[in-house]
């Protein structure tokens, strides 16, 4: 990590900010040509090894697949996506390898998942080191730089950008820190941008479990990239099938990494952000509620104050404030909420359940969110602990794990949640996973010749569980949480959004304000939709928490005016945060500096600049050169703290820059333009 920190502070800093183009980044014809050529040569070419690998019965997959029967199928999914299915079958053992790939026509993207199944009547020989991605990029020499961000670990430097120069034959390795949470830790973010001479490729590993990736310089000419489930060494029983992580590649050209990231953001919104009735998840505002009938009066205070939110969020609570029975179990006092495993409403607190509250919320145009943590069974005295111990995998830091790879356990969970969604009027299913993660329980349950099987079947079951809930309830929305933003891989983000990007949000945490400014700075390269809650009420602090999902603390007479202002301001700019993103300063946590960024919506000619003068910053003014504007257009700028508007041409704002003055410190500016 010392090397990571040494190389990582300047990503998207002065070197990349020197590139200023006059128009918004769009997909180039050359990028589409490169992507089509790569698919033809590396995925569809029967003479070339496919871009994945494994070892079967001691034989490398390149050798094995070349001797097996191969079939192909092609079919359109819609006007922008074509599916290619490639199947190899071993006539001796019945092992079948099926690669399902999707080629995009509107973005230079291809993705695939590999399924490996036993179609025979006996156990297969050992299959090991199954890699969803094993491919080489580059080949002409030159410098290779790997861009990305850290994962979440409840720290100010969560989501910190890095840039690693891949020198002569180094190997850079990435994985969550033995937790099984896909976005956990300093090297646990499963999204990468590999820059090479003339362009690069963005790579995503979709696996809500323990993945691993490596980037190896190949004789100074190229880079070999491998990614997959971290551990596979197993045989398959008859009828059994495992899969690799989803792999997505986006090809880009040029030298502007920031613009390449905006192509990624556009593809993400167009094809990945969950949709309801065909529309992607819009920005939203939320409040925290208890969910009891008496909480209607409290939630009504927001409406009477003119604060109209989109969702009312009932979280876990702590100790005796939980909505589920939590008194029985090993955890006591403020930790009693960890006694999970009985997913029933505590009728002593909610004699009529949540339906009276959710009905009231619906009548006022709001949805209802309810927190669950079904995977962790924290109490052996819970309903699951007493009635179905055979469904539980022991070994987690805070109890046992409900085995979602077990069809009986998964079907019970689906039906139980289905009934609660219907009976309680739930609009959002919020899923959490606390403690040190599921990996110890997965590994503990594996036999020496079945290493990785528990995790693989579990991950498949977990995704199937979510898919079935969404099939039964097409309007249901899912919020992904795992001690904050630690399970936000691409497979997860196609089904859910992170209403809470990190648990690093509370006033008691040192550096939380500047840390959240930096969370927005880093995470915005990858996830257009993100959220958090803020428990400050001064503009400098609050404005650092403006996101597509926004909420504040308890409404009091003392903070009502501040909350009215903050909710209104965030509502104005939140839609812009799903558009193109440009950092306007280098990344920094230092209190002596400014930090700023821009969101730009070129299709509508509008955007927003957010700038922060930190508490110890001596400079009262700073000039930022904007990006993505029409140089010949005139823009009207509105400072949220000033009455008058100003006008500049796009050329002036991009070449001369926008000068922001903040006389006080700390202070924040929000400036919209159209």
Image: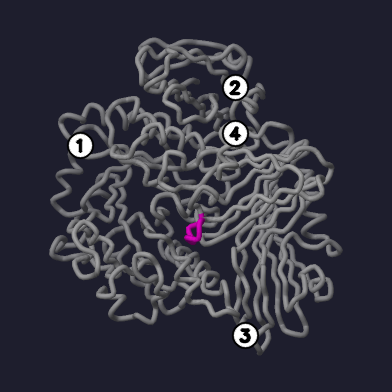
Foreground: 560 or 308? 560
- Distance from label 2 to label 1 (Cα)? 39 Å
Element on which disc 4 rests: loop
Contact between marks 2 and 3 (CB within 8 A): the answer is no
Q: What residue do we see at 32% from left, 37% from top?
A: 534
Q: Which mark is residue 238?
A: 3
- Distance from label 4 to label 3 (Cα)? 49 Å
Kindly identify which residue carries mark 2: 629
- Give the x, y percent position of residue 255: 72, 32
- Give the x, y percent position of residue 396: 40, 67
Tell me how many marks there are: 4
Q: Which residues are magenta?
A: 177-182
- Distance from label 3 to label 1 (Cα)? 59 Å
Asked which colour scheme the image uses, the reply is: one colour
Figure check: 476 above or below 289: below
Q: Nearer the viewer, mark 2 or mark 4?
A: 4
First in sequence: mark 2 vs mark 3: 3
> Farthest residue toward the bottom?
121
Q: Is residue 23 left or right of residue 29?
A: left
Q: What secondary structure is the magenta-colored segment mainly?
A: loop
Q: Residues within 10 Å of mark 3 (few under 14, many from 20)?
A: some
Q: Is residue 514 left or right of residue 554?
A: right
Kindly identify which residue carries mark 4: 11
- Residue 29: tell me if it is visible: no
Kindly identify which residue carries mark 1: 555
First in sequence: mark 2 vs mark 4: 4
First in sequence: mark 2 vs mark 1: 1
């Amino acid at each position: 990590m010392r090397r990571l920190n040494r190389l990582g502070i300047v990503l998207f800093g002065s070197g990349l900010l020197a590139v200023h183009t006059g128009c918004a980044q769009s997909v180039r014809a050359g990028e589409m040509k490169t992507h089509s050529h790569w698919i033809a040569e590396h995925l569809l070419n029967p003479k070339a090894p496919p871009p994945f690998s494994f070892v079967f019965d001691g034989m490398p997959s390149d050798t094995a697949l070349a001797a097996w029967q191969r079939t192909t199928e092609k079919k359109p999914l819609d006007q922008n996506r074509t599916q290619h299915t490639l199947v190899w079958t071993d006539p001796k053992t019945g092992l079948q390898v099926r690669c399902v790939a999707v080629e995009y026509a509107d973005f230079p993207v291809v993705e695939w998942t590999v399924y490996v199944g036993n179609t025979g009547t006996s156990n297969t020989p050992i299959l090991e080191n199954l890699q969803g991605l094993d491919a080489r990029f580059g080949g002409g020499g030159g410098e290779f730089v790997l861009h990305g961000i850290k994962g979440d670990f409840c720290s100010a430097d969560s989501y910190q950008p890095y840039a690693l120069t891949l020198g002569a034959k180094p190997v850079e390795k990435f994985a969550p820190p033995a937790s099984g949470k896909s976005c956990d830790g300093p090297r646990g973010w499963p999204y990468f941008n590999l820059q090479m001479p003339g362009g690069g490729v963005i790579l995503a590993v979709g696996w809500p479990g323990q993945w691993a990736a490596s980037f190896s310089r190949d004789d100074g000419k190229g880079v070999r990239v491998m990614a997959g489930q971290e551990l596979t060494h197993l045989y398959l029983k008859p009828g059994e099938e495992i899969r690799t992580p989803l792999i997505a590649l986006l090809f880009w050209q040029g030298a502007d990494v920031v613009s390449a990231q905006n192509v990624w953001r556009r593809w993400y919104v167009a094809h990945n952000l969950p949709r309801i009735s065909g529309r992607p998840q819009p920005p939203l505002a939320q409040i925290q509620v208890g969910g009891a009938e008496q909480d209607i009066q409290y939630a009504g205070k927001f409406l009477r104050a003119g604060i109209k939110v989109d969702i009312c969020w009932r979280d876990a609570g702590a100790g005796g404030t939980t909505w589920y029975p939590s008194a029985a179990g090993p955890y006591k006092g403020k930790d009693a909420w960890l006694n999970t495993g009985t997913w029933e409403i505590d009728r002593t607190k909610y004699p009529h359940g949540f339906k009276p509250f959710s009905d009231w919320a619906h009548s006022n145009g709001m949805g209802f969110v309810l927190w669950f943590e079904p995977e962790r069974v924290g109490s052996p005295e819970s309903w699951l602990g007493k009635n179905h111990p055979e469904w539980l995998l022991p070994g987690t830091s805070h109890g046992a794990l409900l085995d979602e790879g077990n069809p009986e356990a998964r079907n019970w969970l689906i039906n139980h949640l289905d009934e609660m969604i219907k009976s309680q009027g739930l609009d959002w299913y919020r899923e959490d996973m606390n403690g040190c993660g599921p990996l110890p329980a997965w590994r503990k349950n594996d036999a020496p010749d079945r290493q990785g099987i528990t995790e693989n079947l579990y991950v498949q079951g977990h995704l199937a569980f979510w898919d079935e809930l969404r099939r039964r309830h097409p309007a249901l929305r899912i919020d992904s949480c795992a001690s904050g933003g630690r399970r936000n891989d691409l497979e997860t983000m196609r089904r859910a959004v992170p209403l809470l990007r990190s648990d690093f949000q509370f006033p008691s945490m040192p550096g939380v304000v500047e840390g959240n400014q930096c969370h927005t700075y880093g995470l915005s390269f990858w996830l257009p939709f993100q959220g958090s809650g803020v428990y400050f009420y001064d503009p400098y602090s609050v404005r650092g928490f403006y996101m597509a999902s926004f909420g504040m603390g308890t409404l009091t007479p003392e903070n009502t005016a501040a909350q009215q202002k903050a909710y209104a301001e965030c509502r104005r700019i939140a839609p812009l945060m799903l558009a193109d993103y440009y950092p306007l300063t280098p990344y920094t946590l230092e209190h002596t500096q400014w930090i700023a960024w821009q969101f730009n919506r070129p299709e509508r000619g509008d955007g927003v600049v957010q700038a922060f003068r930190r508490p110890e910053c001596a400079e009262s003014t700073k000039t930022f050169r904007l990006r993505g504007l029409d140089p010949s257009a005139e823009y009207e700028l509105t400072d949220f703290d000033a009455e008058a508007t100003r006008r500049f041409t796009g050329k002036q704002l991009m070449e001369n820059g926008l000068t922001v003055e903040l006389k006080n410190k700390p202070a924040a500016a929000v400036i919209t333009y159209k």
